[in-house]
Amino acid sequence: MVNKIAVFEKIIDEASKGVLKDCSPQTLFVPAKYILSLGGKRIRPLLTLMAMDLFSKNAEESLDAALAVEIFHNFSLVHDDLMDRADLRRGYPTVHKKWSDNSAILSGDALVIEAYKYIAKVPVGLLPEILELFSTTAMEICKGQQYDMDFERRFDVTEDEYLEMIRLKTAVLIGCALKIGGIIAGAPPRDADLLYQFGINMGLAFQLKDDLLDVYGIPETFGKKIGGDILCNKKTILLIRGLKNADNAQREELNRWLTATGYDPEEKIRSVKNIYDELNLKFVVENLIEKYYLASLDCLSSVNAPDNSKRDLINLSENLMYREK
Amino acid sequence: MVNKIAVFEKIIDEASKGVLKDCSPQTLFVPAKYILSLGGKRIRPLLTLMAMDLFSKNAEESLDAALAVEIFHNFSLVHDDLMDRADLRRGYPTVHKKWSDNSAILSGDALVIEAYKYIAKVPVGLLPEILELFSTTAMEICKGQQYDMDFERRFDVTEDEYLEMIRLKTAVLIGCALKIGGIIAGAPPRDADLLYQFGINMGLAFQLKDDLLDVYGIPETFGKKIGGDILCNKKTILLIRGLKNADNAQREELNRWLTATGYDPEEKIRSVKNIYDELNLKFVVENLIEKYYLASLDCLSSVNAPDNSKRDLINLSENLMYREK
């Protein structure tokens, strides 16, 4: 049996190479093509094709829309990395590190516009609906990034606020990718909405897993340093739950580390992780991930398509949940 | 007789106040609304309404598209000011000065997306054509900004390269604003294209006038310091023509000033202006402006609409050509 995921991945990779090809000036488009060429998991465009595949034999017809989602995702990476002053992306220098801040700003802008050029290629009758979904999602992602930055300066972020932030910053684009595939396939609105909710729950679980891996990942397979979020006081689900579930002594110690300066990084990671361990947070967060994962499967199972056609989507989301990097 | 320009200006100003109203988080949208509230000349949305007015009694029906153009223009101001490290815009602190670099990046991004939300409101049958024009123009503006930045590090910019840069950075959005008005009014393609060319020529003349005012403006009415472009070695039409028309001694002196450090700013402005005067550049550039201005009027006169309906557009472009600030 043909592995559809592998086939779709290949189609997406090939098509990605054509994005912004032969555009000048080089100073604008080489950085834009660089971020696209770094690859990554290509989950979002894959989800668009796979969602379409539930209802149609012509999944490739959603390729342009799938690329629009991927290009927009890459725009947000370039600008977010700049705002977060991140040095590395997918193991390579970020655009502003390799070129300059201005390069990251302007090539990011070019990527947003290119994303809209690709979304404009969907069948004309579907354009208004898809354009509306795409712009709403794009704006939500900006809001999510803003909340994320605002949270850096706050120590009273609630779990609900945090979940809303990751819904905006991460989950809606996954929902959008899936729903667009459904819309192009001609799926009934109810099914397209279920695909969206499948994506929202998957996106939440995905981001919570990210938070977990930062502390409990296996260093050899994780690919980046363990404890990065702890060192920069990132408001993750672990820190928020930790502060909430802690007893007075533990909370005091957590707060001491959050405001500490001039410490030994390894000691900070060890001490904070120690409190997380005492609070059994690995288990707590794994349960939360499971909750959203099961909710996502629930949505998918309600989609009116043959069960066997859903197997690839289930496999993909399972891989994301049980990934080690 | 009712002054249509004043009526349209009022409609645009009122409608601008509704853009991004009641959006949260404030940290994202207050900077975006700030730049929109600074006003400026609102030339672009005005041109959309006036172009539509040539063919239709319902110019207001192009208001959403007109606002899309204005919102996009404001996005480009926020990001360009950040990239150029400009402190002031329309006499007020720029977004990155008033808030932060990150604020300018992200609220700029939100403005691009908002612009697309407004362009999506055009009549659905016209959406594909207008979206295509809008995205092509948007990408050209990014290219123009990239060329402008690239030129900062070059001393061999030719006049053709310069004209192409200002066409991309400034003229195409003016052409786009006009053409969209024509398209929504249902103008024949030939007339819509003529409106676009009218805008391109007007935009070129407009930017050349900008270059001229920097050196030959009247300090009292110009509103900003005379000679700013000279001090930062900006590749303007005056510098490019100056280097081309100069004799060996003049070229040597210009090059000396271009590479000088630790000089008296007033002396640099005086000396460079002196060479421009010797080369009669005010006259030369005024002629060039006149050339593009006449070409723009030529395009407008070929548009198949009653002559008296064009009077307002001619007045507006005349005002832009003979403006002192």
Image (cartoon, coloured by chain):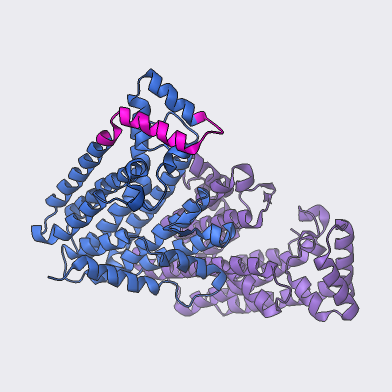
Chain colours: A purple, B blue
- Residue at horizontal 9 percent and vertical 60 percent from the top: B308
Q: Is B260 covered by the magenta stretch?
A: yes
Above or below — where is B56 with respect to B323? below
- Residue at horizontal 19 percent and vertical 43 percent from the top: B295
Side (left or right) of B150 relative to A238: left
Q: Position of residue B256 (x, y in %)?
A: 48, 26
Q: Position of residue A21 (x, y in %)?
A: 46, 43
Where, by quadrant of the figure, is residue A219 drawn?
A: bottom right
Q: Is residue B105 visible?
A: no
Above or below — where is B279 with respect to B8? above
Q: Which stretch is magenta?
A: B259-284
- Residue at horizontal 26 percent and vertical 60 percent from the top: B47
Relative to the observer, which residue lies in front, B107 or B99?
B99
Q: Is A268 covered by the magenta stretch?
A: no
Q: Position of residue A133 (x, y in %)?
A: 46, 70
Magenta part mainly helix, strand or loop? helix
Q: Is residue A204 visible?
A: yes
Above or below — where is B9 with respect to B145? below
Relative to the observer, which residue lies in front, B51 or B207?
B207
Relative to the observer, which residue lies in front, A34 or B174?
B174
